[in-house]
Image: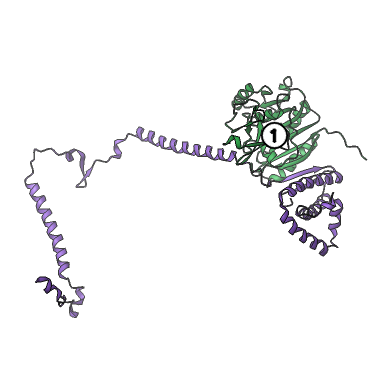
Chain colours: A green, B purple
Amino acid sequence: MKGGSRVVVQPHRHDGVFVAKGKEDALCTKNMVPGEAVYGEKRVSVQNEDGSKVEYRVWNPFRSKLAAAILGGVDNIWIAPGTRVLYLGAASGTTVSHVSDIVGPTGVVYAVEFSHRSGRDLVNMAKKRTNVIPIIEDARHPARYRMLVGMVDVIFSDVAQPDQARILALNASYFLKNGGHFVISIKANCIDSTVPAEAVFAQEVKKLQAEQFKPSEQVTLEPFERDHACVVGGYRMPKKQKV
Amino acid sequence: MSSLRNAIPRRTHKERAQPQERKKFGLLEKHKDYVLRARAFHQKEDTLRRLREKAASRNPDEFYFKMVNTRMVDGIHRPKSEANEYTPEELMLMKTQDIGYVLQKLQSEKKKIERLNSALHTLDHQPENKHVFYAEDREEAKEIQSKQFEKRDSLASVKVPGRIKKKQLHLTENWKQGKKGFKTWKSTTRIWPCKENCRNLGESVNLVKMKLFNRQLDLCINGVQNASVRLYSSSTLI
C-alpha cells in the first residue's frame, strides 16, 4: 500500500485482525516477523505516537478462505490471540502465516500438510515463526503425529477432500478439547460436482452433526471463491440447561 | 497586345460527338484521349526498343549476380525463396521462442491481475454472500435473529444521514396509520427491542425486513425435519 503515512489501521471485529484504511480498505494482520513478506503480499508500516513502528501484512481474501470468510461477515472465527490452532491442509503456509500473526507469540499453530513440495515452503515459513509447528503428514492418520500435537482450542480444516468431514472428526477426536471449535472450508466441487453447491453444504453439515459437531453458522465465500462455504461451530458442546 | 486579344471572349472550340448512326461503336475518341493513348503506346515501343538494343549489345562473358540469385520456374525468373534459408531445427527453435514469449506475457498479465485483485477487499460493501445460522430450537433462533438485527441496525443508523431519516419518518408514520390491522405487524413490534427508537429510516427498513424474516422463519420451522432450525439471512433479506 503506497503512502504509508496516510494509512490508518483499525482493529477488526475479530481479535488480532486489523483493517488498513488507506485509498482502499484492506484486511491485514500484525506481522510477527517485521520486514518479511511470506508470499509477496503488501505490508503496511504504521508509526505509533511514541515513535515505535508496527508492521501489518495485507491479507488477500482471494488466496485465503479464512480471510474470505471474515470479509463474508462470519460471526466468530474462534481464532484469537493466545489460542492453539490445528490447521489441516496448510499448503504453502500463506494462510498459516496470517493465523500465526493472529494467535501471536502466546498461541501456537500446528500446520499439517501432506504434499512435500508445498511442505517445503511451509517449513521455510515456519523457520521464521516460532509459533508455527509444521507437520508433513497425512491428515487422515492423526495417530502418526499425535506426539507432536497437544490439545487445541480450534481446528481449521481446508483439505478439499471428499471425506473431509471424517478427517476433521478424526483429528478432533484426538486433539480438540471438549467445547472447542472448528472452522471448515468446503469446496462443493471436491465433494460432489453433480449436485448443486447448496445441497453439498447441507449434506456436509449433516455429516458434521453426526460426528458430535454442532455447526453454528455457514457463510459462502461468494465474491472471492465460487461454490465454497465456510462452516463454523463447536465440538462436544455442553448441553443447555432447560429453564 | 496579346493580353488584349485574350481579353476578348472567344468562341469555345467544340469537338463533335459520335454521330447517331455510329452510336454502336461507343463514345467518339477525343483528341486528348488520343494523346494519352499514343503516349502510352510510344512508351512501350521505346521500352521494347531499349531492351532489344541491350540484348543485342550484351557481353556473353560478363557476370551478373542475378545469374546466381534467381532461377527459372516455368520459364520465369524467380528470386531464390528466402524461407528455405532456415533449417527445420532453426524453425523449431524460433517457434518455441515465440510460444515462450506468449506464455511469459500471459503469466505476467496474470500476476498483474492478481496483484490488483489482492488490494480489492471490498470492505465497505455489503457482502453478497449467503449467511446461514444453525439453531437448535425456536428460542435460540429468535436470539440469533435479534442479535443479527441489532448488528445490522447499528450499521444502518451510522450510515444513513439525518436529512434522509426525516423524510422517511413521514412515510413510516403514514404507513403505520394505513396498515394498522396488518397481522404480522404486531408480532414484529413485540419482538423489537427498543420501541422508542423506531423513528428513523434504519428501523423502518428493518421492520419490513423483520416482517419478511419472521415469515421465512415460520416457514422454516414448519418445514423442519430434525431439531435443527435453519435460518436464512441472505442478501435478499438484509
- Residue at the extreme top of the image, as rendered: A147
Picture quadrant where residue A139 is located: top right
Residue A5: x and y, percent? 60, 35
What chain letter is assigned to the residue under label 1? A
Picture quadrant where residue A181 is located: top right
Left or right relative to B191: residue B115: left
Residue for point 9% across, 47% down: B55
Picture quadrant where residue A147 is located: top right
Residue for point 70% across, 25% down: A110
Q: Secondary structure at mark 1?
A: strand
Q: Is residue A241 above or below residue B213?
A: above
Residue B160: x and y, percent? 72, 51
Who is closer to the viewer here, B1 or A12?
B1
- Residue at the extreme bottom of the image, as rendered: B20
Left or right relative to A189: residue B216: right
Residue B197: x and y, percent? 82, 52
Left or right relative to B72: residue B225: right
Find disc 1 in the rendering and name its residue. Answer: A17
How packed is label 1: few (under 14 Cα within 10 Å), some, or many (20 or more)? many
Amino acid found under the numbered disc labelled 1: Val
Q: Number of callouts in the render?
A: 1
Q: Is residue A92 above or below residue B179?
A: above
Q: Quadrant of the N terminus of chain B?
A: bottom left
Who is closer to the viewer here, A96 or B227?
A96
